[in-house]
Amino acid sequence: MAITFDVQSADIDESPCPGEDPERLVRRLSLAKAEAIERDGIIVAADTVVVSDLCVLGKPTSPQEATRTLRSLRGRSHHVYTGIAVLDRNRARACVQVAASPVRMREYSDDEIAAYVASGDPMDKAGAYAIQHQGFSPVAAIEGCYANVMGFPICHLYRLLTAWDLLAPVHPLACCPMAQREPCPYAEDVLAAPLPEGC
């Protein structure tokens, strides 16, 4: 059975609060996005940040910033955090989960950066890159959820929907681009983990 849904953007201030750590930031922003959508039913929202050298890297505000960010990440490791919030207004309940994945970038060239930035793709991406971009393919290795680095950890969503007895007609491993190519070593642990307190 197919699930019908609408896509809406939430206009919120995504600025970090002073001293706010990445997990708390994505928890707060994903829930704020869900709460900003004024409709009944189930609302799902997510927020992703890239963290390098204790600095939170959001979406670049200019091609120059995208270039600087990609140069700073080149050949190094960083972390991707995604908060995913599910709000059930009909039953007055909400749950926020966080996925975290260490990522190591490859040694891409300045020319590759310039071509990728010129494509415009980095401008709406946290950390100025998309792991799934076939022309750039910036990532050398990843630990943890691939879908999290794409910005939407689908195993986390599936775990919550099934725990809430909500219809989830497709298993996440049938949707994850990485799991389509090779077995995922992380999905079983994610799906079996208990929900965060309060969910």
Image: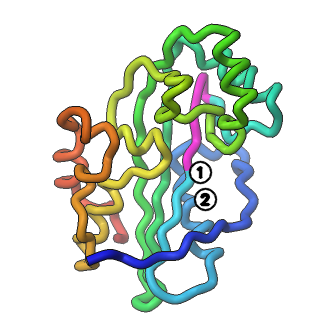
Boundaries of the magenta span: 48-54
Label ID, residue 29:
2
The residue lying at 70 percent from left, 32 percent from top is 119
Left or right: where 26 falls relative to 84: right
Which quadrant: the C terminus? bottom left
The secondary structure making up most of the magenta span is strand
Q: Is 194 above or below relative to 7?
A: above
**Residue 185 location, quadrant:** top left
Q: Is 7 above or below relative to 117?
A: below
Label ID, residue 43:
none
Q: Residues within 10 Å of mark 1 (few under 14, many from 20)?
A: many
Instruction: Look at the numbered disc 2 and give the secondary structure of its residue.
Output: helix
Q: Which residue is mark 1?
A: 25
Residue 51 part of the magenta segment:
yes
* 2 and 1 marks in contact (CB < 8 Å): yes
Left or right: where 150 falls relative to 73: left
Q: Position of residue 57 (x, y in %)?
A: 66, 35
Instruction: Look at the numbered disc 1 and give the secondary structure of its residue.
Output: helix
Q: Nearer the viewer, residue 140 or 194?
A: 140
